[in-house]
Amino acid sequence: KEVVQSDYGKRKGHFRSWWNIVDFISIFLVYIYTFSTLVRGVGSGSVPLAVATTLCLTLKLLAYLRGFDSTGWLISVLTQNVLDVGGFVLIITVVLIGFMLCFRLLFGNVEGTCQLILDNGDSIIQECGKKPYGTLHDSLFSTFELAILASYDQGHFDESDYTTLAVLIFVLAVTIVLVIALNALIAVLGDSYSRVQEHAIANRRKERAELIVEYLSIIPSNKSREIEANTKYFHALLEADADGDLLIVKDDWEGGLNALKKDLSEQNATSYEMTRDAIEQLRCHLDDDMEQLKNDITSLIQELSHEIKEIKRLQNDGGVTFNNKNVRNAVKVVKGVGKHLDMRHHLEMGLRPFRQNSQPSTDSNDQRPFWQGFPKIPKGDQDDT
């Protein structure tokens, strides 16, 4: 079967899937065990070979469960868990070997469990089992029971030559292995489960597709062409999630990572809405402020335009009546400048003393302001002046 599926060894990628490797090994072991039983006789087969064959056939049975919806995703989870705990197994093995050597030094002289029995002569005999830490093999098994399963005998600590040190090493081993390491293992398995469930539907399809390809590869070519000719294909619009996976079961558990991504997306959407509302409110306030500023500037321009028109009218009429305080102040300054210019002119010409000539004219007929004798400013230069 595996030879046909691999196209007689031409398909090199066939054995990249470890399910195909399990199939090949299980078939190989079945043939070897059958041949061994036929040679030795029924009931005299190799027990280790039978155990290995049974384990491989069990894994092969699990491979067939990949095609069902209720078990396919569990097979994917277990497969991913086995792949993810490789580093943890290496670390915990090193830790157990270290504590095994410590316990062998501390409990190497401790006898096994002893029992009192009666022999044929009705005499009491004490029989003790083998030492739990007598050999490296026994020490490793006893350390596994003590650290992983927390199974120990209190008498071992009493019989040890270093009771206090043995208790401290025991507490340290239980804390590191049973509390810290196993909780870390649970966290690793939980993260592995979440990653598988994040793409549960895609993984389920993948496992089912592998089985279909496997079955199509072993059927005859004429039967395969007949199946392809009789198969009708059609296109359908089905509901899918954000990743493009079909929502076969909508209430399917999405996994911790996927749920976290959904929460972050919702928070980003809420933050976007709040930011957009804040920007909209700020724009409304800016529009109101700009409108108010526009009105103020318009009002100021109108007032200035009115003042300019008033100045033009007064210049044309020769009047001195100004309604604006600033304009009146400017007129006073111009009057002062005119007086100083008039006094300098009299001093330069050597006319009458300054005090006499600087008195204002008492001619009742001359009531015009002094600046009306100046030449008239052209209209085009009024703004600059």
Image: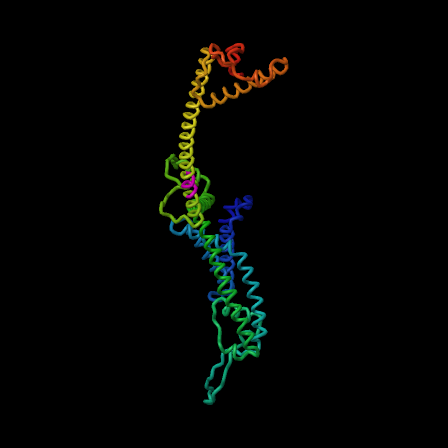
The colouring scheme, among rainbow, by chain, secondary structure or one colour, is: rainbow
State the image coordinates of residue 129 (x, y, percent, origin top left): 51, 78
Give the residues drawn in magenta, as a range: 267-272
Q: Is residue 349 left or right of residue 284?
A: right
Image location of residue 89, percent across then percent down: 53, 59
Given residues 35 and 209, the one toward you in this image is 209
Q: Residue 144: horizontal and vertical position, in percent?
A: 51, 67
Magenta span: helix, strand or loop, mainly? helix
Evaluate whether residue 278 shows in this view.
Answer: yes
State yes or no: residue 8 in magenta.
Answer: no
213 up-or-down from 356: above or below: below
Q: Is residue 183 above or below residue 71?
A: below
Q: Residue at x 49, y 22 (%)?
A: 329
Magenta residue check for 270: yes
Q: Nearer the viewer, residue 370 or 109?
A: 370
Question: Residue 289 placed where, x, y %?
Answer: 42, 30
The front one of 260 and 357 is: 357
Residue 191 vertical placement versus 40 (above, below): above
Visible in this render: residue 223? no
Q: Quadrant of residue 109?
A: bottom right
- All told, the count of numbered labels is 0
